[in-house]
Image (spheres, rainbow, N blue to C red):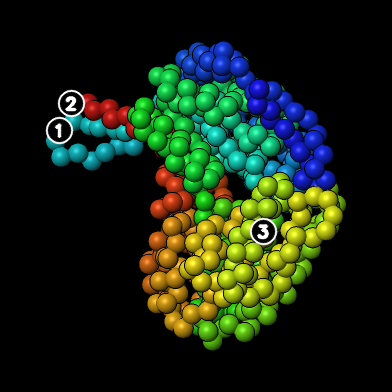
Amino acid sequence: MKKYAAVNPTNGEVLEEFDSLTDAEATAALERSASAYRSWHREDLKERQKVLFAIAEAHRTHSTELAHLTALEMGKPLAQAKGEIELSASIYEYYAREATTLLADEELEIAGSGQAVVRTASIGPLLGIMPWNFPYYQVARFVAPNLLLGNTILLKHASSCPQQALRIEQILREAGTPEGVYQNIFATSDQIADLIASPKLQGVSLTGSERAGSIVGAQAGKYMKKCVLELGGSDPFLVLSSADATAAAKAAAEGRFRNAGQICSSSKRMIVDESQWETFVETFVEHAQEFTTGDPLAESTKMGPMASLQARTDLSAQVADAITKGATVHTGGQIPEGPGAYYPATVLSGVTPEMRAFHEELFGPVAVLHRVASAEEAIELANDSPFGLGGAVFTNDQQEAAYVSDRLEVGMVGINTTIKSAPDLPFGGVKASGIGRELGKFGLNEFANKKLIRHP
C-alpha cells in the first residue's frame, strides 16, 4: 500500500508515515461529500461566513505550530512559513467579508421585455489536488471561495506533507465546518481517476506539474468535469534601459530565492538590457549570496533546504547540463557536502536554447540571466517559453511599461514589482502554465453555476 511520508529534508529522517486510502474508503469519502452538499449549499450565507471567519482566526491562533510543521516537512524557514499562514488567513477572511458582494445577483440589461439576473450558485462536490511548496496557501485559495459558494471539498494533498494536510482538516473541523464538507484524503492516482469519473464529483482543481496537469485535464475532459489547472512557470523579469538596475536586482533576488526558489510564479529568467547588464549582474549576484542556507527552524535563516533530495537531484542535473554546454556560473552550482537537500543560490548566464535550462522550469534556487540589446529583443526572448504564468517589467518609462506588458504572453504582469499574491487579485496563466484563475471574484466563479433567471 502506498505511503504518505513526512520526511525532514534537513536530514532525511522519516517523521511519520500514513497509509493511503482503500478503494472502499475513497468511495465512502465521496459519498459523504455528496451527502453533506445537500445541506451545506442550503445553509444560510451568514453561517458559511461565520465558518470562514473562524478558519481565518484558527490559522492565526495556531500560526507558530503550523509554521513549525512546514519547516519540518518541506524545509521552509519559519518567518516565511508564518507569512504564508497569514496570507492564507487573509484569503478565508476576504471571502467571508466580501461574501454578499461576491454572491450578489447581477442584473442584466436585456433587449427584450422583462428582467433577467445571473445568480452565482454552487455546483457540488469538488476535488482539490494540492502541492507541497505552499501547503496552507494553495489549499486556502481553492477551499475558501468554494466553501463560501456552498460546494463541498475532497482535498488530496502532496504525499510529502501529510502532517500539515491532517492539521488543516482538524482546523477546519474545529472552526465549525460540518461533517463531510471538507475531507482530507490520502488517495492514490487510480483513486483520483475513479473520483473524477464519478457523476457525483462536479469539478477538480490541480496545482502541480505539467505532467500531472495533462493527466488530470484529460480525465476531467473525458467526463465533462470543470477543471482549473495551475501548473509551472518560467517567469521573465525584464530590466529595460531606463530602469533602476540596482533596485531591480534586489527585487529579482528576493523573488527568485525566497522559499528556496520553489515558487511557480517567481521570476526565473532575468532579461537585462545591455546598458544595465554590468550593474545588474554585480548587484544580483551580491544579493544571491546573501541567501545562505541554514536550519529552517532558526528564525534568522533566509533559505532552508529544498523540499526533497529528489528535487535537488533534478535541479542539479539541469544546472550540470548548462555548465557542460558552456554556461557561466557566477555563484553556486555545486551540491554542498553534508546531510539534507540543501542547494546554494545559483546564478547562470550564457544559457542557450540547446541547454535544458533555457526552456525548462528551474524549480529551485537557480536564476538564469540573459543580455539583450533592446526592448523588442527582451519581449521576444520573454515569450520564447512554453510557459505563460507571470512576468515583471522594470522601467521608468510609463509608455514603455504599457507597451511591453501588453505584449508579454503571460497571465500576470508586475510593473516595477514582482508578482505578489493577494486575496482579491486573480492568479493564473496561459500556455503550459495552466487553465483558469484563482482568488478574487474570478476564483469564485470557476466552480460556480452562473444561473440565468429571467422574468417576463
The residue singled out by tag 2 in the image is 456
* Vertical arrangement, residue 1 with respect to residue 57, above or below: above
Q: Residues within 10 Å of mark 3 (few under 14, many from 20)?
A: some
The residue singled out by tag 1 in the image is 113
- The three-letter amino acid code for the residue at tag 3 is Ser
Distance (Cα) linking label 3 and label 1 = 66 Å
The residue singled out by tag 3 in the image is 316
Cβ atoms at labels 2 and 3 below 8 Å apart: no
Q: Earlier in the sequence, mark 1 or mark 2?
A: 1
- The three-letter amino acid code for the residue at tag 1 is Ser
* Vertical arrangement, residue 376 with respect to residue 221, above or below: below
Q: Residues within 10 Å of mark 1 (few under 14, many from 20)?
A: few
Observer-nearest of 355 and 420:
355
Q: Earlier in the sequence, mark 3 or mark 1?
A: 1
Residue for point 32% across, 29% down: 451
Q: Residue furthest left?
A: 112
